[in-house]
Amino acid sequence: MNDTEQLIKDALGQLAERTPHPGPTLNALRRKRKQQRSNIFLMATAGVAAVAVLIFAGVVASDRYAPPDANSAAAALMPGTGQTVDIEYTPHWLPDGYVETFRSVGEETTRVWVPASAKDVDPTLQTGHPRVSLTSLQALPDLSGWLETSVRGLKAWARTVQGQSAGPTTELVWQAQDVLRVSVRGQEAGQQTAMSVAESVRSDTKISFLTPFSLDGKPAGDVWGSTPSRWTARWHSEKYVVTVSTSTPAQTSGTPVSVRGRQGAIVADGSLVVRDSGLWLTVSGDGQSTDDLVDTATRVSLQHMDHPDTEWIGKGL
Amino acid sequence: MTPSFDDFAAEQVTPLLRYATVLTCDPHLAQDVVQEVLLRAQQKWDRIGSVDLPHAYVKRMVTNEYLSWRRRRAAKDVALCMSTLESVTPPVADTTHHYDEREAMLQRIARLPRKQRAAVVLRYYENYDDSEIAQMLGCAEGTVRSHISRALATLRTEHLPEPAGAGLRFGEGLS
């Protein structure tokens, strides 16, 4: 064996000494297997449900079937297309006990995890509670004053800021395929936590979810909650804010109005409220007429209300 | 008797990670590759667990996964940098001047085309002969020899001979 070959052997031997600890791989394996079992169960359940629905539709209801009117609530309940949203990035490490409570999609995608003990706190409010978020940004922010560092060998920038929250917030930004930002609030070692989360982030094009509703084919932008059966979804534009929630709004009675084949109400603040498929639908818009609110509510398309895609809410990794 | 998948994974995960680390030159990618392979192996464990050498079979899966992973993700690949390796496990202390040579050689190995690199790893780390490497890579023995020959030519070309006096620190041994 010549010098080059011996050097190759030595170099490869040295590289082998940097083998990572098996713990994270075994843990990730256990998580994925559990997830797969859960998916198989869901598919089996969905299959049984689909068969039951087909039998019912074919045998029981065939003699009195009529296509729903395009403006009826039944038509609005038909699942649309294009509401599945890709969640391209996911962390594989979070502080112990953190669960996901918020997802925001659109030009930027954000996911938020909080301690399980704080999952009932509305994540859309600035409460200062501890939280970890991962955001896919459109572009790098202004990095003046940020410290340069690295994430998985890629150039990254970090800063710790004191905002309106009780404790400091550490932000870590790096340029992978997309620009990604990890934000950590309320952790004693925020920088270390942010780095650990960032180092564990992986791209996974298989991760997607179906937002609970859409309007004119555009999915709800924000979804949050504490459990799969307790959640709120929000869609907003310059004119309207539409929410669909399992929780009862502050006001539900007011001037009666017919909407989506049901009786709703225009409440004191001018919003339209109606209960549909066991959920509360609210449409508000400054200066919008009742007809406009009703028209907007009619265009809302709810998604698979028998089994909405909210299983991720309140779950950890 | 067929071992359970859990026992197999617990026993083999470290050797597989070590092999994948050497193969990929990237501990993070090694974790991803081994995780993906073990997940698939678990799904087909009835068949894989009953072959003569399950660990050899899964090792081949790791090799194939690495080769196809590289193809799938070629557009997303980030150039290897030693800081990636050192962020996972710091380099072991080495006070000899050979340390730098090994680091430089590692960088060169990391730049080899994937099949050449796999052939080099199987020959010089796993000590496989040509037929074993051919079986692992799914190619002819002649192709294996070609891969290794080309890899060695590249590594030799870039391996500059050590100048006389190398290893001496500035000011040492000059009196």
Image (tube, rainbow, N blue to C red):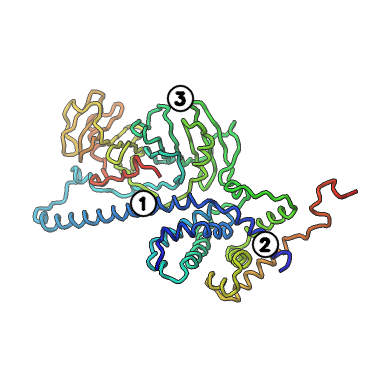
Given the image, what chain letter belongs to the residue carrying mark 3?
A
Given the image, what chain letter belongs to the residue carrying mark 1?
A
Residue on which the image places disc 2: A8
Who's the residue at 62% across and 56% down the image? Answer: A15
The reply to whether callout 3 and callout 1 are in contact (CB within 8 Å) is no
In the image, A93 versus B7, the foreground residue is: B7
Residue on which the image places disc 3: A166
Q: In the figure, residue B159 lies in which quadrant?
A: bottom right
Marks 1/2: CA distance?
41 Å
SS at circle 2: helix
Who's the residue at 73% across and 50% down the image? Answer: B95
Mark 2 or mark 1, which is nearer the start of the sequence? 2
Q: Quadrant of the N terminus of chain A?
A: bottom right
In the image, B50 versus A237, the foreground residue is: B50
Q: Is residue A242 above or below residue A3?
A: above
Mark 3 or mark 2, which is nearer the start of the sequence? 2
Label 1 crowd (10 A; few <14 / some 14-19 / many >=20): few
Marks 3/1: CA distance?
36 Å
Residue on which the image places disc 1: A35
Give the amino acid type for the residue marked by disc 2 in the picture.
Ile
The x, y position of residue A125, in whole percent, is: 38, 28
In the image, A76 versus A203, the foreground residue is: A203
The reply to whether callout 2 and callout 3 are in contact (CB within 8 Å) is no
